Structure formats: structure tokens, C-alpha cells
Image (cartoon, rainbow, N blue to C red):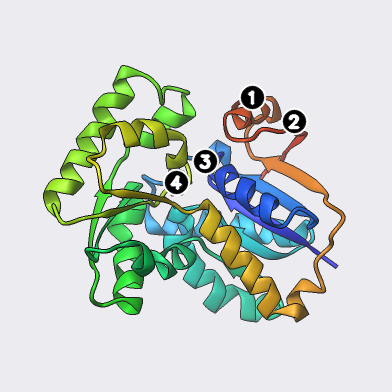
């Protein structure tokens, strides 16, 4: 039997974990945040790929059979390598899923103008992963991307409500909407950004839908487990939760309360 692993570079994946545990409360979960090496958004392809693979291998060692990369940057840079190179060699019954595909799958139903904007870390935007996935599934959709490198630090430093946040939120919204004024849907393509939701809404012109990915990732995982009973039947359903971080456990507990409305116990680990 095994557990579901949820991996993020730090705290942001807790926004995804929140929605997943609401949709599938009985399953066992291990959340792993690589806080000591975050942020990933500014790191190179090779480094994000190496760090993510180390984290996924650790989650497998801890008993996970299915790992969700609840980090757009990791999904953009490491998912394919892990799926194609690591899993067949390790154990073909293990699974790793990302957050970009489930987000992209429903975007055609949301956008009326078929002009979509993606807000993400520098790594996610420069990888072009959203553009490539959207173009694959929906070639008629026009995609524009905008890197928002200050948004993650604003959230992590609990500055989302500050005048500094006003400046950086407005700056990137103005920029993406000037790239393509026909955009009617903006994807929050980074797991930290739902915490800036109120601020983003305050600066958004009317008629633009802000799409945050937690719910669609949870729905997609639910559907995946129904489609794959052979995986589902090997997952423990005792409602257990573990939280692992590569930084100090106390620090994680403190900041996690911004993301999660539940008391948690945290273990510090080392990845290599
Ligand atoms: N969680 C990451 C994402 O969704 C952003 C944080 C980071 O840069 O590490 O892209």
C-alpha cells in the first residue's frame, strides 16, 4: 500500500494540497516543501530538474506511489524527464503527475474570446510549457505569458496586502493586458498566486476571469483515480497527513498557517 505525495518548492503547493484533501479527504498524504532551496522560479532548467527528482525519489522512499508536482515550475521543467526516464527504470507502477495539464484541459471552456494570459514564475514562463500545452490541445487559442518574479517573495513575506504589492501586481497585469487586450482569462500559473487573489482582482478590469488551479487539479486527480482503479486500490485511506520540509520545521509551521487552516506537525529532512 502507499501514500499520495505532494511536492512543491516551498509553501505554494499547500494551496493545491488544500483543494486535494477537501476533494479526497480519506487518502493518506505526505507534503514535501523544499523550502531550503526555494524559490525554484529563478533557477535553471537543470537545477530545477535535479532538485525535483531528488524530492520525488525521497517521496517514493517514504512510501508514496503517486506524486503530484504541485509546483508549476517543477511541472514545467522536470515532469517529462521523470515520467520518461526515471519511472520506467524505477517501477513502472509508480506515477508522477503535474499541474499544468489539468489546468490547460479546461481553459477552452472558460475563455470566450480564446485569448488567454498566463502569469507565472520566470522559469515557468520561459519554458513556454503553458503555450505548448495549450497550442497542442487548443490550437485556436492565443496565449501570452508574463513572468511576475516579485509575487512569490511578496506572499512568502506576508506582504500581499501592502502598497508594495499594489505596485508589482498592477505592473504585471498592465503588461500582460497590453500584450494582448483581447485576453478574457488569466491563469494563475504559480501555486503562490491564489494568496494574491484579492489584490489581483482589485486591479483587474471587469470581464476578465482569474483562473486559479487548485480545484481543477483536485478534480483531475479524482477523475484519474476513478479511471485507474489499479492505482487507487494500492493507496492507503486512513486520512493520515505528514509534512516534510528541508528548512526548519518551526519556520514551516509558522508560514504554513498563511496557506492552511489546520494545525500541522512538521519534520525537517535533507535532500540529496
Ligand atoms: N511553487 C512555484 C510554482 O508554482 C513557485 C515558487 C518558486 O519559485 O519556488 O511555480
Image location of residue 183, percent across then percent down: 21, 55
Name the residue carrying label 1. 254
Q: Nearer the viewer, residue 120 or 195?
A: 195
Residue at disc 4, CB closer than 8 Å to ligand 1: yes
Is 50 positioned to the left or the right of 239 in the image? left
Name the residue carrying label 4. 40
What's the distance in space between the residues labelled 4 and 2, CA to CA? Answer: 26 Å
Q: Which mark, residue 37?
A: 3
Tell which tag, 1 or 4, sits nearer the viewer.
1
Tell me the SS state at disc 4.
loop
- Could you tell which of marks 4 and 2 lies nearer the N-terminus? 4
Tell which tag, 4 or 2, sits nearer the viewer.
2
Q: Which mark, residue 123?
A: none
Is 80 positioned to the left or the right of 60 in the image? left
Q: Nearer the viewer, residue 140 or 124?
A: 140
What's the distance in space between the residues labelled 1 and 3, CA to CA? Answer: 18 Å
Tell which tag, 1 or 3, sits nearer the viewer.
1
Identity of the residue drawn at 24% across and 42% down: 206
On screen, residue 144 above or below 90: above
Name the residue carrying label 2. 263
Amino acid at each position: 500500500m502507499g501514500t499520495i505525495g505532494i511536492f512543491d518548492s516551498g509553501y505554494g503547493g499547500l494551496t493545491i494540497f488544500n483543494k486535494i484533501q477537501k476533494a479526497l479527504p480519506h487518502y493518506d498524504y505526505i507534503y514535501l516543501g523544499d523550502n531550503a532551496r526555494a524559490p525554484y522560479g529563478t533557477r535553471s532548467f537543470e537545477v530545477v530538474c535535479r532538485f525535483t527528482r531528488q524530492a520525488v525519489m525521497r517521496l517514493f522512499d517514504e512510501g508514496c506511489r503517486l506524486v503530484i508536482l504541485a509546483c508549476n515550475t517543477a511541472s514545467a521543467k522536470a515532469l517529462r524527464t521523470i515520467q520518461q526516464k526515471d519511472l520506467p527504470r524505477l517501477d513502472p507502477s509508480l506515477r508522477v503527475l503535474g499541474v499544468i495539464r489539468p489546468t490547460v484541459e479546461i481553459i477552452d471552456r472558460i475563455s470566450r474570446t480564446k485569448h488567454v494570459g498566463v502569469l507565472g514564475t520566470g522559469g515557468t514562463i520561459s519554458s513556454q510549457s503553458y503555450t505548448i500545452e495549450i497550442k497542442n490541445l487548443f490550437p485556436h487559442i492565443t496565449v501570452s505569458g508574463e513572468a511576475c518574479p516579485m509575487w512569490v517573495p511578496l506572499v512568502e513575506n506576508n506582504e500581499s496586502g501592502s502598497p508594495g504589492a499594489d505596485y508589482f501586481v498592477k505592473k504585471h497585469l498592465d503588461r500582460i493586458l497590453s500584450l494582448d487586450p483581447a485576453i478574457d482569462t488569466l491563469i494563475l500559473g504559480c501555486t503562490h498566486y491564489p494568496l494574491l487573489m484579492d489584490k489581483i482582482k482589485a486591479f483587474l478590469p471587469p470581464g476578465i476571469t482569474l483562473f486559479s488551479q487548485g480545484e481543477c487539479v483536485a478534480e483531475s486527480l479524482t477523475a484519474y483515480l476513478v479511471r485507474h482503479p489499479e492505482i487507487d486500490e494500492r493507496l492507503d485511506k486512513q486520512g493520515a497527513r505528514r509534512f516534510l520540509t528541508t528548512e526548519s520545521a518551526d519556520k514551516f509551521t509558522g508560514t504554513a498557517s498563511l496557506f492552511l487552516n489546520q494545525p500541522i506537525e512538521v519534520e525537517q529532512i535533507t535532500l540529496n
